[in-house]
Each structure stands twice: as structure tokens, then as C-alpha cells.
Image (spheres, rainbow, N blue to C red):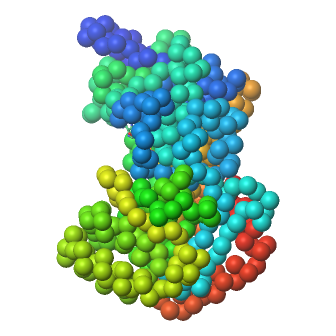
Amino acid sequence: MLSRSIRYFSNSAIRAATQVAPPTLQDVVIIGGGPAGLSLLATLKNSPKTKHLNCTLIEGGSLDKVREFATNPPQEYTNRCVSITPKTIDYMKHKIGSWDFIHEDRIKEYQGIIAYDGQDADSRVEFDVNSIGKDNLAAMCENINIQASLLAKVESLGLEDTTTIKDNTKVVDIINPLTPDLENHDLNEIDEVPGTGKLDWPIIKLSTGESIQTRLLVGCDGYNSPVRKYAQIESRGWQYNTFGVVATVKLQYEDFRSVGWQRFLTTGPLAILPLSEDNATIVWSSTPELSEILVKVNKDIFPRLVTAAMVLEETDLKYIYGLLKENPDDLSAVEEIEWRMSKVPEVVLEERYPAAIVSVLDGSRARFPLKLSHADTYVAPRVALVGDAAHTIHPLAGQGLNMGQSDVIHLVEALEKGIDRGLDLGSTLVLESYVSNAWPANHAMLGICDKMHKLFSTDFYPLVLARGLGMKTVNFLSPVKDMMMKSISL
Ligand SMILES: Cc1cc2nc3c(=O)[nH]c(=O)nc-3n(C[C@H](O)[C@H](O)[C@H](O)COP(=O)(O)OP(=O)(O)OC[C@H]3O[C@@H](n4cnc5c(N)ncnc54)[C@H](O)[C@@H]3O)c2cc1C
């Protein structure tokens, strides 16, 4: 303590000489203005117990498009869409109050999912939530619609004196005053605020030259989380060597079935998920090579290729991929597809497969590397991790954003309890209950999605047979199906 106070006085002297501004003090600093960060800020500001906290959110990119979306959304759908569960929607409606600001005309609720095996179309499971007395399995929504509604909610609360949002501002460094890296940090930055004992509050250095010292630092800063690195929290996992290709497409007609479709190909699952009217979004997880073809292929071929990939045998598909790898504009691929599709009876196409895709929205195709990662813990002294900073999951069950939302629920509960008990919000005593409530369920979900990805990406015959039997059995056993549906829609 003696050496610290000595350093305080000597640092102050240096500061006075060099005129470096002291860090601003905050209760909570959130890094990341993605769905997780905005959700946390909106919840804290809407909760009677936490709204008085001084909060700052830092986002490296611009939030202009998000703001504009709230008042003036584009006519066409944006290409990043997520499936959100009734629990997530319920939280946004009742705890955050951000649903009032969502563009509901751009939300598509759906009642079921039809999943089938790429190696055997008869191996299928058809989930329909009406059988468990629920109205909807989930809803499709654009990421930006969620972000815009959260931001609009925060701005509507008018708590400017305790809320700061800094976009176009990167976190360039985070310093732990207890163990400063003296080689890389000027001692001048590391200081104690007189009489407050804030020596262990992290100091966040921003690209604007400002610095903030905070009681609690929350990393909502995605997969590469600088906050996780600062806290030296180990994250384990692997790359799938697979990319998720997304696109916004138009269907031949509005599908009255209102279900999501998923076909498990050995290259990865292909999902077609409904948006309003005749719009839909696709997520096609595939090999690096195939994903490159999918983003490059001629826009008149792409819709037919996706339709075919939901129906044709994989040997046929591989032949067509080969043509398109040579030349992504090779229109003879369309003839090859049509010829093969013409052998499937019309009635089978109508009853067992999704509506055909007729066009793809310009500029909507993009690919994302897929990986699994899970942090060993979500907290360290004065630090918490939320959302993709804590875990990333294969998108096959559409759970990533929902898991981040569930993190927010548990973290805010922990902070509210801490406030009730008069505890220091950054202490691990307060934060521990967040980890114990959030981590196990996330771990289970990560494991399930990983196993599903591995099970379905093999064409090893005994496994194909076993999973086919499994799917058929599940499809016939209503109680098992109902249980699975309840867990997906939570
Ligand atoms: C193809 C695909 C399909 C998906 N489908 C679904 C689905 O159907 N359902 C679902 O629930 N989830 C889905 N997900 C997952 C979902 O999109 C993510 O889990 C979610 O968007 C993560 O949100 P986040 O806020 O945690 O992180 P991000 O959205 O990654 O936000 C992190 C933010 O931190 C900022 N940041 C990072 N570093 C810094 C820094 N140094 N300084 C300042 N700011 C910084 C970044 O700019 C970024 O805005 C899907 C993902 C993919 C790839």
C-alpha cells in the first residue's frame, strides 16, 4: 500500500508536468455495440435497480446504419438474419422494453422445422410446435433490427447524464493497474484516485486518446475479445474448417407452411428460413472450397443451385459444383440441374421440399468462418464476458445470439442482487452467480451443436444408417420430439 501511495503522488506530479488528463470514472464499461453489448446496456438502463449506474458503451465501428434503420429501414432485407427464440423475444418485450421499437413487419414467426438427411431424404424429423401447445417455435429477424430497437430503447430513456455511447472508437489497450506492463505502459497512465481506492479498476485506452477507468468492464467484443485477452481467460475450441454462406432470396411463392427447412449435407447443413411474404434467408454451411463457389457463382445460377441442394443426391451435386468451380458463370450447370430435378415428381417436390428459390438479392451473399469456442469462465475480478466473447457456436441450431441474450439475463440478475446487498459490482462475489447460472447451459448447447455437426457431416455408412434410424425413430416418438422442441424454443 505504501509503495502504491508513493506512486500515486509521483504519478500525479508527472501528470501535472505533462498535462495528461486523468481517466474518466465509470461504473460499467461495455466494449462492443453488437446485439450482446446493446442488449446489456438497454437492460441496465431499463432496470430500476441499475439505471443509476454510470455506463459507457464503446463500439469500434459506426452505429449510423443501426440508428438509421430505426427510423428509415431499407426496403429490402439485410443479409444478417437470426432465428430468435420466444424466450429472447419475451425478454426484449418485458425486461428491456425494446420490442416496442422493433420493426415487427420485418419479423417472421415460424411454427416448425423440417430437417432431413442429405444421404437419405426419408430420414427426417418434422417438428411442429402446435403439438406442444405453443404458437411459435422461433422468429426470424435481421440482426440490425434487433440492434436498432435496443439503441432506440436506450435513447428513448433520456438518461444521457449516466449513459454514454461512443462509436467509431476502438479500445486500443486495457491496463490492469495492479500488474502494469511497465515496458509497454507509461507509469503516468496508472494512477490511484485519491480516497477511492480504485487501484484495481481496469483502465481502458481508446483510439480517441481518452481513457476510462471502470468498476466493471464487460467484454461484448466478439470472438477475438480484447477484454478476454486482458483478463487472461482461456478460451478453448476449434475452427470447423467450414464457412457459413448467407444470402437473402425470393421464393417462388409465399410458403403457407411457415417452417424452417434444414438439409444435412456432408459438406454441412443447408437451411432455408422464412422471412415475410416470399422472402427467405439461407445459411449454407460448407467447405472452404464450396463456400467460395457459392459466393462467386452467377446470380442466375445460385437460386437453382440452392433449390437443387435441398433435393438432389450429393453425387449429382458434386458434379455440378465441379462445373461451377471451373467456371462460376457456366450456364450449362442450370441445364444439368433442371434435367436432374425434372426426374423428381412435381407432387414430391411440393410436399416434401421447400418452395423453389427464384432469385437472390444483389450483394446479399457473404461467408463467415465457423468455429466453436468456449471461455473457461466468464468472469475475473472487475471483468465479465458476454455473447460471442464468451462462446461461439455452429449456427446449425440458430442459438448464438440467443445464448448471448441469456448471458445478459443472468449477468443483470447477478448485478441486481449485488446492488440489493450493497456489494461492489466488480467483485467476483457478485459476478460468480452469473457464471454458475450461464456457463453450464451454454456448454451443453455447444456440445449438442458440435456433435450434430460431426454426426451429419460424415458419409461413413454405419453412421449414416444409425442417424437415419435415429431421425426416423425420433419422428415417430412424439414425447421425444416434444421434449426436443421445448428445448429448442426456450
Ligand atoms: C452464418 C451465421 C448465422 C447465424 N445464425 C444465428 C441464428 O439463427 N440465431 C442466433 O441466435 N445466432 C446466430 N448466429 C450467431 C450470432 O450472429 C452471434 O452470436 C451474435 O451476432 C454475436 O453478437 P455479439 O454482440 O456477442 O458479438 P458481435 O456481433 O461480434 O459484436 C462484437 C462487437 O464488438 C466490437 N469490438 C470488437 N473489438 C473491439 C475493440 N477493440 N474496440 C471497440 N469495439 C470492438 C465489434 O466491432 C462488434 O461490433 C449466426 C452466426 C453466423 C456466423
Q: Position of residue 57 (x, y in %)?
A: 47, 28
Q: Position of residue 466 (x, y in %)?
A: 60, 88
Q: Quadrant of residue 330?
A: bottom left
User: Is residue 252 shown to the viewer in this render?
Assistant: yes
Residue at the spot x=68%, y=48% of the render? 87
Residue at the spot x=42%, y=84% of the render? 342
> Which quadrant would the C terminus be assigned to in this image?
bottom right
User: Is residue 37 shown to the viewer in this render?
Assistant: no
Q: Is residue 47 above or below residue 410?
A: above
Q: Position of residue 293 (x, y in %)?
A: 28, 69
Residue at the spot x=37%, y=67% of the render? 303
Residue at the spot x=57%, y=36% of the render? 102
User: In the image, 82: left or right of 225?
Assistant: right
Task: Count every numbered label the image shows and give the total.
Answer: 0
Q: Position of residue 146 (x, y in %)?
A: 53, 40
In the rendered image, the residue lying farthest to the bottom is 462
> Foreground: 443 or 81?
81
> Foreground: 109 or 206?
109
User: In the image, 100: left or right of 463?
Assistant: right
Q: Quadrant of residue 59?
A: top left
> Foreground: 476 or 223?
476
Q: Is residue 284 above or below residue 383?
A: below
